[in-house]
C-alpha cells in the first residue's frame, strides 16, 4: 500500500467517511461511535488511514472520527498497514475502496 497522498484534490474527509461506511454496510455516523464492534472499528481504522493520506493531521482525523487522540490514529494506521501486508482479503478490500474513492473524485 502506497501511503503517499495520490488522491485527487476533490477527495475530502467526508467523502472518505461516506465511502468507507457504505462499503462496510454502515452509516457514516457509526464510524464516529466509540465502540469496539469489530466491523465498526475496522471501518474506522480504514477511514483514518485514508484521511491521513490526503494530508489531514492525525489529531484532526481523530477529532473527525469520534474524538480519538493522535496516538489512536497512529495505531490505527499501523494496524491497517500491517493487515494490508499480510491479509489478502483485507488488501483487496482496501484496493476496492481506493478505486471507489478515485471514481468518486472524477
Image (cartoon, rainbow, N blue to C red):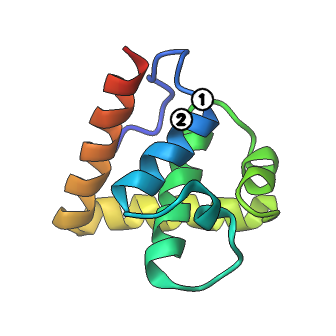
- State the separation of the CA atoms marked 1 and 2: 5 Å
Q: Residue 5: where, in percent of width, then height?
A: 51, 27
Q: What residue appears at the point 75 percent right and 65 percent down from the top-left corner?
A: 71
Q: Residue 75: where, in percent of width, then height?
A: 62, 67
Q: Is residue 20 left or right of residue 15?
A: left
Q: What residue appears at the point 36 percent right and 14 percent down from the top-left corner?
A: 106
Q: Secondary structure at mark 1?
A: loop
Q: What residue appears at the point 40 percent right and 53 percent down from the top-left corner?
A: 22
Name the quadrant containing residue 9: top right
Q: Secondary structure at mark 2?
A: helix
Mark drawn on residue 15: 2
Question: Are the residues at dot 1 and dot 2 in contact (C-beta closer than 8 Å)?
Answer: yes
Q: Is residue 70 left or right of residue 2?
A: right
Mark drawn on residue 12: 1
Q: Is residue 8 left or right of residue 17?
A: left
Q: What residue occupies the far front of the structure in this picture?
A: 27
23 over 10 or under it: above or below: below
Q: Residue 66: where, in percent of width, then height?
A: 76, 63
Q: Residue 30: where, in percent of width, then height?
A: 60, 66
Amino acid at each position: 500500500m502506497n501511503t503517499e497522498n495520490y488522491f485527487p484534490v476533490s477527495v475530502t474527509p467526508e467523502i472518505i467517511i461516506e465511502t468507507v461506511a457504505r462499503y462496510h454496510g454502515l452509516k457514516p455516523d457509526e464510524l464516529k461511535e466509540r465502540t469496539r464492534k469489530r466491523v465498526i472499528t475496522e471501518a474506522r481504522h480504514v477511514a483514518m488511514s485514508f484521511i491521513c493520506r490526503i494530508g489531514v493531521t492525525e489529531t484532526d482525523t481523530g477529532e473527525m472520527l469520534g474524538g480519538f487522540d493522535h496516538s489512536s490514529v497512529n495505531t490505527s494506521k499501523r494496524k491497517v498497514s500491517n493487515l494490508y501486508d499480510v491479509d489478502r482479503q483485507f488488501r483487496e478490500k482496501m484496493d476496492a475502496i481506493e478505486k471507489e474513492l478515485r471514481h468518486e473524485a472524477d
